[in-house]
Amino acid sequence: MNEAVFAHRIQFAFTVMFHYLFPILTMGLGFFIAVFSTLHLITEDIRYADAARFWAKIFAVNFALGVVTGIPLEFEFGTNWSRFSSFGGGVFGQALPLEGVYAFFLESGFLGMFLAGEKRVGRTLHWISGLGVAIGSLLSGYFIVATNAWMQHPVGYVMDHSGAIHLESFWAVLLNPYAAWQYAHTINGALLTAAFVIGGVGAFYLLSERHMGFSILSVKTAIVAGVILSLTQLFPTGDLNGASVVQYQPTKLAAMEGLFETSQGAPLAIIGMPDTQNGKLIDPIYVPEFLSFLAYGNFRATVEGLNSYSRDLWPPVELTYYCYHIMVGLGTIFIAQMLIGLFLLWRRKLYSSRWFLWMLMLTIPFPYIANEAGWTVSEVGRQPWLVYGLMKTPAGTSANVAAGETIFTTMGFAGIYAVLGVLFLFLVARIIHKGPQEDATAHG
Amino acid sequence: MINAVWFFALAAMLTAYTVLDGYDLGVGSLSLWIAKNDDERRMALNSIGPVWNGNEVWLIAAGGMMVVSFPRVYAVGFSGFYLALMLVLWLLILRGVSIEFRSQSRNPLWRALWDGGFWVGSLLLALLLGVALGNVVRGLPIGADGYFQGTFGLLLNPYALLTGILTVVVLAWHGTNYLRVKTEGALFERAVRWSRTLWWIAAGMVIVVTIATFIVLSGGPRTFHVYPAAWIIPFFVLAGLVWGYLSRGADRGTPAFRSSALVIIALMLTAALTVFPNLLPSIVNPQYSLNIYNSASSPHALRVSLIANGFGMIAVVVYSVYVHRVFHGKVRLDEGHY
């Protein structure tokens, strides 16, 4: 691969993967804070207010990092992918600015009110601002997913004789069928991550025998929400997101499943190592005919393998395959973990099962890994296409930006983000160490 | 027609950004000297704290709108200004993180670190944004291939440096006026004095940059010859400066703030009219300039996106005004989040 193309890809991939760590929690935690806040308004139970106030502190730090690491991405559409933007801007750009106009303004606008606290703005306004922030962040997720969905499955355009594309339908772009379940699966993933973080921190306090009221509420919330969310992550959101891939991106499906040979009654590989050279999986464990069933609802259906396509249309198989299997593997573990937690809750043993609380605490990073792995499947699996079926990745870069410039700035980002990451962990650890304050008049 | 509407919509977005985040940057670029102790620093931070994030979104929203309305301009401009924009991004990170992290710890070294970051980030951002605008007005080496490569050697030319300094000075003046409205005590008194001094420097720089612009665009900007009525906009720069001078009294913080806002609006619109109908003029050959016709999306794309974004922006203005109202009045330190 051309050095410059590689540099542009690395820069975008690195900056977006680091950035995404933060919106996951912003979207997920924002929702839970809004729920706690609402429950407090309804029930007057002070534990909900304490919970909302505590999580708002972590939310503030997380949100700030999400914003500053997010702005580079909007710029990078132009700085690193100028030919892509010039080509498709009139079409995919229908969704992109709406993220700013309908979502960023909402969440950033009300954030100040939200962080200023109840004492400053009053209870009702504080509650409304919390809703504004939560809704804004969830809405921003839709518009950016719709932008990505256009790259996965371009719609709403018409091509002229010169090869340029023009917008044909605004609503087709905004309501891209690919976007709906991609968005649902993404949001579900964010909510699930927040559940794990809430539960993990609660578990930490329980294990340390501190803040019992708060931690019991946290762990219970995590388990109840976690059972539902881990299941919906698989079905329907995961399954139906996968259905879009089956329908619109057969090479991605083949790569992520490690299916080289077109097969009738294609087996599902639970594990196995792709040997792309020789077109097979090493040491696979198969469930016979199950891939056909998952993809088409029919055990005898034919699923296309990579061999149906010329090599230059294959995505990087190994990365796509492993990230997919990591994501699904973790997702399965999450279901099992949460069901065990639910069982313990039912038997009134949850808060005293130290082994389970340890597991809950230690698995905090795993949903992050699963989210990132999933997005890697989405983006790497789309290769060699930048816009599936329309524009290959090397054709979309900024040709006027030298590899050297890009490598320099990527290193710059790497350094800055390493520092930011350490600072983030430090600040969050301090907040957790300080713990939730039961006193409603204490200010941060 | 709609192409021109979009041009001015973008100009309006960027103007709103400069008026709003302008005072955040102005406060920041003076912060180390105008605020002399921890209480004053906290007062300055809390004056912009609840609103700075929302103010910054105007820039992001403007960028997104540029993608859909003039994708070629976005592509050529952003890739051409590559290194400068990366620097801007890092400064935005520095500025944002400094504001949000500073009060997370009471340790004086921690606070001093982020005070420094807030100052450096704000000052350099104001400078670079001014340099960028100056280069757009002056013109860029866009060649036959439709792209350019903006090296620092190119971008830091004398004219752009002057517009950069103008921006720093005007935004600093604007920032002191904001502090006059929002703060009390010694910080307020310093803001009043500094506002007066900065007015003189700002007025001087306006004159210098005006002359420089006439030199650089030999004969003056074309738009003003073709539409002489456009001269009313630069007139408002003058009017704003006069209003600012008349508002130098200690109790005239609010009119002073409005006057500096007016000066910024008029300067931005003057710049917009100066390049119109170009968005990225070429100094190699006017034929290579990116204008509102050769760089736009299709008419249909322009129409629907104008409606979709327009609706949203009406709502934004309404609730943004409301949010700013909630925080109006002097900063109350005991209630400050920062």
Image (spheres, rainbow, N blue to C red):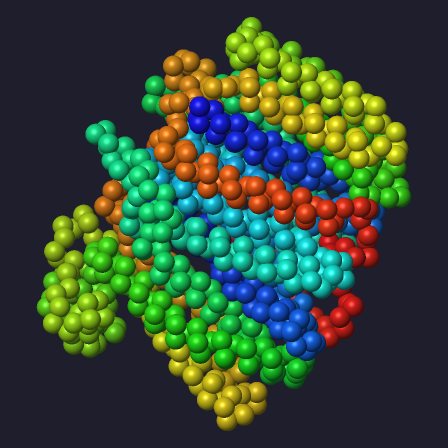
Give residue A360's position: percent from left, percent from top. Answer: 50, 78
Left or right: where B254 falls relative to A112: right
Residue A279 visible in the snapshot: no
- Name the residue located 88 percent from the left edge and 37 percent from the top edge: B189
From the viewer's perspective, tell me whether residue B299 is left or right of residue A26. Answer: left
Q: Position of residue A157 (x, y in %)?
A: 29, 40
How many marks on residues? 0
Q: Is residue A84 left or right of residue B321?
A: left
What residue is drawn where x is 14% and y is 53%? A309
The image position of residue B129, as x and y in percent, is 59, 31
The quarter in which the N terminus of chain A is drawn is: top left
Question: Residue B284's x, y, as percent?
Answer: 42, 14
Q: Residue sitting at 39 percent across and 72 percent down? A: A232
Q: Residue A433, relative to residue A85: is it above or below?
A: below
What residue appears at the point 56 percent right and 25 percent down from the top-left corner?
Answer: B133
Q: Is residue A190 above or below residue B71?
A: below
